[in-house]
Amino acid sequence: MDSNRFDDIGRALAGRGSRRGALGVLTGAAIGGLTGLFAGPELESEAKGKKKGKGKKRKKPQGERCGRVTCRLNERCCGGRCVDPFLCCDGTEDCNGCQACVDGLCEVDLSRNGAPCSDCLVCNDGACEVPNDEFCQNHELCRPENGRCCAKCLDDQCCEIGEVCIKSGASAANSCCNTVRNEPCGANGDGTFRACCESGIEECVQDTCELKIPCPDGSRFARGLCCEGGQASCWGPAGPFCPPLGHTCCGAASCDSTQRCCDESRSLCCPKGQCAAGQCCTGDLKGCNGECGDTDTDRRHCGRCGFNCDAPGFECCGGSCTNLRSDDENCGACGNACNPRSEVCREGECREICSHNQPPWQNPCDDGVDHWCCPDGSTRCCRLSGNPHCC
């Protein structure tokens, strides 16, 4: 080891005040001296070979070594670990109010409770935590991992930095829009947008993404398609598609004129009037207040949705709210009809007409077409000359 090397060690020791730093320098110097001492002709030839290979393909840049591993380019080796650079420190003043610098790494310091943390976090019992009120602005969320605010999206998850949240509708899935490559369109008023227009192809026109270049018929529609008859394009698993004429978009499907979109997230088209709670009602059932009901028999939806037939003695028969105690067509039960010539419904039973007359008119007389009652004393109905009468 030459004298110049010892001079380097002396200057390094003079510039560092810590015992840990001095020890690191001495160790490095010892290793370096031993390497130079034992280096033989083989190492010299290897060095010459490296110079000759000057034109070889360069290796991809890598991060710094940290023990037995290599850190990523966006990481630093601190405290023997590869971490985010903002966690590294040279002193406690480099850390936030809840932390202290320990072996080059910012760690929680219980003795510093109450001091401010980074960005939106607060110090609680020596730890930086998300506050209850999440005091980020414009409906943003506070990230617990780094204390930075982000756009609230995807069931209270965060969009990345440089992205905004897209909420196109109540039943549509949320997404994030990269503002570098695309243009957010149609502000919802809560920090989110309705659509994400593709830069260079689409532009935001009245809160809708439309083609920059109009279609042959002069119309302009989103997603890069010009559909027949000027119809708007739909979006399916494979991308945008043109629906058949007269159809409307429903998620990844399209509904015809006899259907309605029942659940856009499931791409479900139902016959009109037969959608309830995201499912199609089968058969004669209709969608009423979020449930499937039979308007012919359902007392809560008798004849139409929401019409309640729930009074005592009443029942929903064939879509009509009827009194089973007096209805000749539905006497005592739906569909139980009395004989129209000779019976009437009383107290839910079909009874002979004459039995309800007061004396002296209790003897029935029926010619097969008409039915009437004869007075007391007439024991039979006479049929003379085709003209029946009470005898």
Image (cartoon, grey):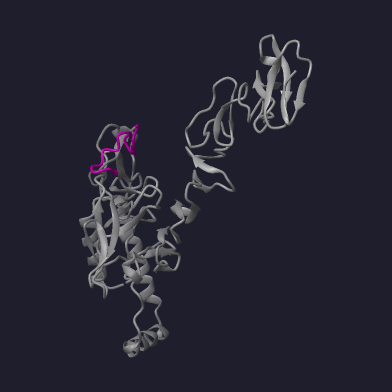
Residue 103 showing in the rendered view: yes
Would residue 197 be found to the left or right of residue 69 on screen?
Answer: left
Q: Quadrant of residue 176?
A: bottom left
Q: Is residue 126 magenta?
A: yes
Q: Quadrant of the N terminus?
A: bottom left
Q: Quadrant of the C terminus?
A: top right
Q: Residue furthest bottom?
A: 52
Q: Position of residue 77 (x, y in %)?
A: 35, 58
Q: Quadrant of residue 375?
A: top right
Would residue 291 be found to the left or right of residue 353 on screen?
Answer: left
Is the magenta region chiefly helix, strand or loop?
loop
Q: Position of residue 199 (x, y in %)?
A: 25, 68
Q: Residue furthest front?
A: 385
Q: Quadrant of residue 140?
A: top left
Q: Is residue 201 above or below residue 275?
A: below
Which portion, as a residue range, is magenta? 125-140
Q: Is residue 180 magenta?
A: no
Which residue is drawn at the image coordinates 42% and 85% (left, top)? 42
Which residue is drawn at the image coordinates 73% and 22% (left, top)? 365
